[in-house]
Structures are given as structure tokens and as C-alpha cells.
């Protein structure tokens, strides 16, 4: 999967390919978060922007005969066109994703490229559409079939369903069958997550804005207008992040595949935070330090505990194979030792089938990943080092699974221009299975600090 952007925040023109572990690093204000939020928004909203139109004759046939068949392959062959048109629509919606003025994105282009040679359709699909206690129609694909069967349920003479409702459900079914195995389900931990952990019960954006509007409107209230109004004050990743934190009482009722099959990952995470999280029946959230008979509220807990809160609940209750876990600056509030542990956590997740995407300023995370890459060889001395230093085989990682990009200025050949132009972009970093990741932005800073300190010590 490859992403191309033009005129997106600081990024004049850039592209990046998603790996099992994708990293964007670089100086502040170089476009890292813009790239992250744009990707998250697309993966979050692709069902809405992908255009799949159902032949109206099929709707008529369904309402007349009570059943109709749709050839899924007819739509699977149009994947490139569907994605391209979806990207055009999404590019026009970026101001909503970032909760910013549309003028800021009037020249922005977002392009997403899928590998479409082998479309792996969902093996089975079965859903029944209900209205109240009555079933209206079912949509099903049987194992091994390439036909979608839509069937009216009950007496077709009494069924009164608007055509556009039927078309929407069929369209959504086709999108899921064709694209769900191709596009990862995203979960994001934004850089605002630490504050969200403390104020989670107060952060109901739409409710708060609605109350403000009612208070300022006096007697001249158009209730319908207020209810339908979109309060787009916060970027979509922040809103979804806050909503996740607010729904913890419901979320804890589920178990993730990591909890079921990989409890060692949760043990590793518990070592990082030094305890565990707990949500009571009254929706009270606490941190329980290991080995102590105390429970701390979020405002009593460390900033590190708060910054990892949503990641912890995601791993314990939400994670599914094939997900894309996106974290803006995972090193927030973490001691260097815990930054190393977080890097090892990412490798563990990748090795069990969760893709990871991060932006980072942490040299510790990069260097620890380098260690995991360099130890991932079948050589006796490396096996001995891994054993001595406490590394397990589950956290070693192949260099081929990692993509790293540096957000910086470079000479780029812009579309339609013969000469290269210096502009803000993303440059792929070199990754070696022997030496790991070359992260220039960190190395240059460290070299500068070393040079100054050597001058101080030896200059006289």
C-alpha cells in the first residue's frame, strides 16, 4: 500500500509505502502528523468515500421477485477506478479530517495505491437488515462463491423500503467483501492522549457545544438546526481518540485476540507501566501499581501511565489481527528505558499480525529497533547476546518488515517540471539487516553534541 500527497501541510510532495512497521521521523513542523492524520482519516472513512453504484434493475428485481443476484467480480475488476474516485472525494474532505479551513486544503491531493493483482474477497458474508422487530432483507455470500444474494424476508407485498436504503446496504456489503481484507482497521493514539485520560468524562465535544449554542441562542432556538449541525472543532483522530477513552466501560466487556492468544504481550505492557488499569462498574478509572495495595485515579497517576492508557486498553480489549495501530510520538513522557521497552512491544505486535505506524523523535526507540534487527540472525554469538541481555525470539524483527521515512527538505521533481525543486518531503531511510536504520536527523544532533562536549573536555 502506497500513499502519495501533494500540498498537505508542510509536505509539498511526498510518498510512503506502508510496512508492517512504518516510522516517520524528523524535526518539528515537517509534516509528520499531517501524513499520519491524513492516512488515519482515509482508513477510517474509506467505506464512505468509495463509490459503488448498484444497477437499479437489480433493486427492481429484488422488490418484484423477492430475490436478486449480483456478480461480485464485476465490481472487483473496477477496484483501481473505485479507489481513485474515492481518493478524489477524500481529498475534498480533508478540511473535515483536520477540522480546519477548507482554503488550507484547496490544492491538496491524497492518493492511495493498492496492490490489486490478487483481490482476496471475504470468504463469507451474511447480514440481515431489520427495522424494529421486523426483518426486511438479507445480504449473503456463501463460502467460495462470487455471487451476492439479496433476499426479501417475509411478505414482499408488505415490504416498503426506499430504493436508496437498499442500494446503500448492498453497496456497503460489496465494499466490505472486496476491500476489508486489503485495508487495515486503524486505531490511533494521538499526541493529545495524556490530557484525554484525565478529562475523559468532561470531553463530550458535541454535547458541550450544543449546550453552549442553546445558552447563547436564548428563545430563538431552531432545535432541528442545532441537532443536525456538525461541530467540527477537533481533528478526527483526536475525536476518535477521546471517544474511545469515554467508552471504556463498554470496551472492557470485550477481549482482544492478544488477550486470548498472546498474553505475554500484555505482561510485557504491564512491565512498561508498572501495573495495570482497572475500570469499575461505576465507570471509575484507576491505575493499580504492581505489588501495592493502592489504586490511583488518572490525575494521581504519572504522565507515563496516562500517555499509555488508550494503547493498553486497545491491546487488552480491542486489537484484531491485521489492524493498524497508529501512535503519534509513543515516547511521550517515557523514561529512556521504557522507550526501549515500547520498541520491543512494537516488534512483538508486528510478529503476531498487528501493523504499527509511528511518528517519533526518539533516538532510543530507533536504536532499540536496530538491536532487534541486528540480533535477528542465526549466529551463535548473537543468540548468546540475546540470551544474556534478555531478548526473546518473539521480539526480534526482520529489516524487510520496516519502512522508515525522514521528513525533511530535499530536491524533488514536481509534476510537470523538468528540474528538481527543493521542498519539504519524505525521504526513505536506509535499513540494513546488519546495521539497522540510518536515522540522519538523530545522528546529526548526537554528533553535534559529541563534538561540543569533546571540545569542552579536550579543547584546553
Image (cartoon, helix red, strand yellow):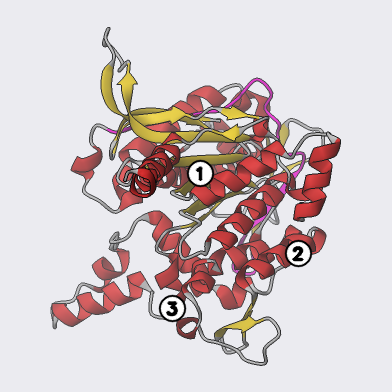
Q: Is residue 408 left or right of residue 58?
A: left
Q: Is residue 1 above or below residue 447?
A: above
Mark 1 vs mark 2: which is more N-terminal? 1
Q: Is residue 117 magenta?
A: yes
Between marks 3 and 1, how big is the CA–CA gap? 28 Å
Front in this rendered view, residue 181 or 20: 20
Magenta segment boundaries in residue numbering: 108-134
Between marks 3 and 2, how big is the CA–CA gap? 25 Å
Q: Are marks 1 and 2 in contact (CB under 8 Å)?
A: no
Q: Read off the residue under disc 3.
A: 198
Residue at left 38%, top 80%?
202
Residue at left 13%, top 82%?
218
- Label 3: which secondary element: helix
Provide residue 192's location: percent of width, then percent of height: 39, 63
Q: Read off the residue under disc 1.
A: 43
Mark 3 vs mark 2: which is more N-terminal? 3
Q: Read off the residue under disc 2.
A: 259
Can residue 173 be seen from the camera position used here? Answer: no
**Which quadrant holds the N terminus?**
top right
Q: Is residue 107 above or below residue 232?
A: above
Between marks 1 and 2, how big is the CA–CA gap? 25 Å
| Other residues around mark 3 within 10 Å, as few (<14) / some (14–19) / many (≥20) | some
Mark 3 vs mark 1: which is more N-terminal? 1
- Label 2: which secondary element: helix
Q: Is residue 72 magenta?
A: no
Q: Is label 3 or label 1 in front?
A: 3
Residue at left 40%, top 41%?
35
Provide residue 135's location: percent of width, then percent of height: 66, 60
Count of marks, rendered view: 3
Amino acid at each position: 500500500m502506497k500513499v502519495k500527497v501533494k500540498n498537505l501541510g508542510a509536505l509539498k510532495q511526498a510518498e510512503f509505502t506502508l510496512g508492517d512497521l512504518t516510522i516517520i521521523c524528523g524535526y518539528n513542523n515537517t509534516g509528520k502528523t499531517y501524513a499520519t492524520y491524513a492516512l488515519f482519516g482515509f482508513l477510517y472513512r474509506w467505506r464512505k468515500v468509495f463509490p459503488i453504484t448498484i444497477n437499479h434493475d437489480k433493486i427492481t428485481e429484488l422488490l418484484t421477485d423477492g430475490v436478486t443476484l449480483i456478480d461480485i467480480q464485476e465490481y472487483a475488476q473496477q477496484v483501481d477506478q473505485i479507489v481513485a474516485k474515492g481518493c478524489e472525494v477524500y481529498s475534498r474532505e480533508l478540511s473535515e479530517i483536520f477540522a480546519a479551513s477548507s482554503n488550507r486544503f484547496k490544492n491538496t491531493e491524497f492518493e492511495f495505491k493498492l496492490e490489486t493483482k490478487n483481490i482476496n474477497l471475504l470468504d463469507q458474508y451474511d447480514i440481515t437488515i431489520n427495522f424494529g422487530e421486523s426483518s426486511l432483507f438479507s445480504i449473503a455470500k456463501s463460502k467460495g462463491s462470487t455471487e451476492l444474494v439479496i433476499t426479501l424476508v417475509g411478505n414482499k407485498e408488505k415490504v416498503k423500503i426506499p430504493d436508496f436504503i437498499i442500494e446503500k446496504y448492498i453497496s456497503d456489503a460489496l465494499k466490505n467483501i472486496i476491500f476489508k481484507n486489503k485495508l487495515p482497521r486503524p486505531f490511533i493514539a494521538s499526541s493529545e492522549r495524556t490530557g484525554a485520560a484525565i478529562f475523559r468524562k468532561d470531553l463530550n465535544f458535541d454535547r458541550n457545544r450544543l449546550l453552549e449554542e442553546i445558552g447563547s441562542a436564548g428563545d430563538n432556538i431552531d432545535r432541528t438546526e442545532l441537532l443536525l449541525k456538525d461541530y467540527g472543532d477537533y481533528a478526527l483522530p483526536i475525536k476518535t481518540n477521546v471517544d474511545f477513552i469515554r467508552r471504556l466501560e463498554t470496551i472492557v466487556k470485550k477481549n482482544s485476540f492478544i488477550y486470548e492468544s498472546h498474553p505475554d504481550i500484555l505482561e510485557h505492557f504491564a512491565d512498561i507501566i508498572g501495573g495495570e488499569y482497572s475500570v469499575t462498574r461505576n465507570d471509575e478509572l484507576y491505575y493499580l501499581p504492581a505489588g501495592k495495595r493502592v489504586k490511583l485515579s488518572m490525575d494521581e497517576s504519572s504522565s507515563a501511565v496516562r500517555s499509555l492508557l488508550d494503547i493498553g486498553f486497545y491491546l487488552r480489549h480491542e486489537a484484531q489481527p491485521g489492524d493498524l495501530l497508529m501512535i503519534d510520538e509513543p515516547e511521550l513522557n517515557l523514561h529512556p528505558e521504557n522507550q526501549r521497552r515500547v520498541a520491543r512491544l512494537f516488534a512483538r505486535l508486528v510478529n503476531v499480525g498487528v501493523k504499527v505506524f509511528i511518528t517519533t523523535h526518539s533516538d532510543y526507540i530507533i536504536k532499540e529497533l536496530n538491536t532487534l534487527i541486528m540480533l535477528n540472525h542465526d549466529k551463535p554469538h548473537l543468540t548468546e547476546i540475546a540470551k544474556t541481555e534478555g531478548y526473546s525470539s518473539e521480539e526480534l524483527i526482520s529489516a524487510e518488515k520496516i519502512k522508515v521515512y525522514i521528513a525533511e527538505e530535499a530536491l524533488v521533481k514536481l509534476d510537470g517540471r523538468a528540474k528538481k525543486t527543493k521542498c519539504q518531503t519524505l525521504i526513505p531511510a536506509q535499513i540494513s539487516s546488519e546495521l539497522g536504520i540510518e536515522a540522519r536527523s538523530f545522528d546529526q544532533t548526537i554528533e553535534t553534541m559529541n563534538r561540543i562536549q569533546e571540545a569542552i573536555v579536550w579543547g584546553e
